Amino acid sequence: MSEQFRAEVRDWLADHCPESMRGPVTEDKIIGGGKRQTFDDPAAKAWLDAMAGKGWTAPTWPKEYGGGGLDKEQHQILQDELQRINARAPITGMGFSMIGPTLLDYGTEDQKLEHLPKIISGEIRWCQGYSEPGAGSDLASLQTRCDDQGDHFEVSGQKIWTSGAQFADWIFTLVRTDFTASKHDGISFVLIDMDQPGVSVRPIQLISGNSPFCETFFDQARCEKKNLVGQLNRGWTVGKRLLQHERSSISGLSGGGRRGRYDHFGTLSSIYQNSIDAVTQDPTGSLRRRILNNEMNHKAFSLTQRRSFEESQSGGTPTFLTSLFKYYGSEQGNDRMELQLEMIGHQGLGWSGDSFDADELATTRTWLRSKASTIAGGSSEVQLNIIAKRVLGLPD
């Protein structure tokens, strides 16, 4: 049965995945969906529509919400076949990696029916409102307030590092609904439509030159009561589960070990002569050993991801173990980017200009962007605390 499904997937991909959608994708070409999404390449829209039509933008989500309804084995086969032809993800974003899975865990039936199909089709794009200027790693200290106005909630406050907020249609956010309770209590998880006067966004430029992060301001923003996820004042439980889904996505668990954005050793040696020279002319062999060690660790990590995916009950997100994968994956990815930059030598110093080609510039900026990977989704220090307490059971 599995070989029959594999053959069907392979045939379908041969017919529906355009050639231009096979191969690496630069950050500016990644499709996030939403009302502001534009398509420079019509093939990208065709690829998205084809995959969404099969429900394969969210292959394991139930069919009643527009998903593919695939079981764990079928999902892994699909990922294998997509990787075999180096197919680009037709769409990515927090709708798939974070809020969608969380709604499947905690959402009402009406919330699932309203929001999940729009994520799958790419109609709506989401962002996350967690961190605040005074509440980052200590997230439970958040102060954005949500007041009951009878027929709706009213939200006022500020969020920061809101990835993709300038492109998003909706935001899922943690707010304080009871200021008299202890800091982990009195927090609620709500969904807010960003297309209203009470919501404003200001992008933050990073050292890579991009502005994926934003400040988001709520000034008496309206939140419908039907968009409360879980129980009032019990949002901390929902919020923690969403972080586990985020870490699962960052570490590659949700894709069964599919490679991530920082995996380019194979292309570097073929593109840059000085990369080859850096390795072959290394007098001590130190660089060769470090590259080999990183590559072996990466392959072992990918196999461990896949084993975890296969051994899970549903192929879904584990609980606190996600912190193990998130910590190791982000640290391993940073080391990989450092090696890539060392391999291309002085050509890795480029910011702009004719002396550097597009691949060299992209490598340098990706290296700069990669510095955030040990912070996003919870810093490495936070992950080590979670591992110590929740996985190893060590005392405080």
Image: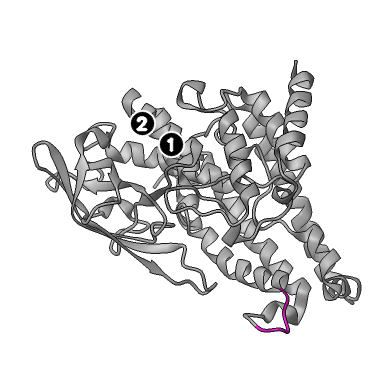
- Circle number at residue 114: 2
Residue type pointed to by label 2:
Glu
Report which residue position mark 1 lands on: 118
By secondary structure, the bulk of the magenta-drawn segment is best described as loop
Residue 237 in view, yes or no: yes
Q: Residue at x 70, y 36 (%)?
A: 16
Locate residue 270, reporting x and y percent: 85, 64
In the figure, residue 6 lies in which quadrant? top right
Crowding at dot 2, Cα within 10 Å, few <14 / some 14-19 / many 20+, comes out as few
Crowding at dot 1, Cα within 10 Å, few <14 / some 14-19 / many 20+, comes out as some
* Quadrant of the frame with the N terminus: top right
Q: Is residue 360 left or right of residue 71?
A: right
Which residue is the extreme one toward the front?
Answer: 42
Residue type pointed to by label 1:
Lys
Locate residue 22, reporting x and y percent: 73, 48
Can you say whether 216 is above or below 363 in the image?
above
Q: Residue at x 50, y 23 (%)?
A: 62
Q: Nearer the viewer, residue 41 or 183?
A: 41
Please report the bounds of the magenta region as a residue range: 353-357
Can you say whether 134 is above or below 76 in the image?
below
Residue 394 in view, yes or no: no
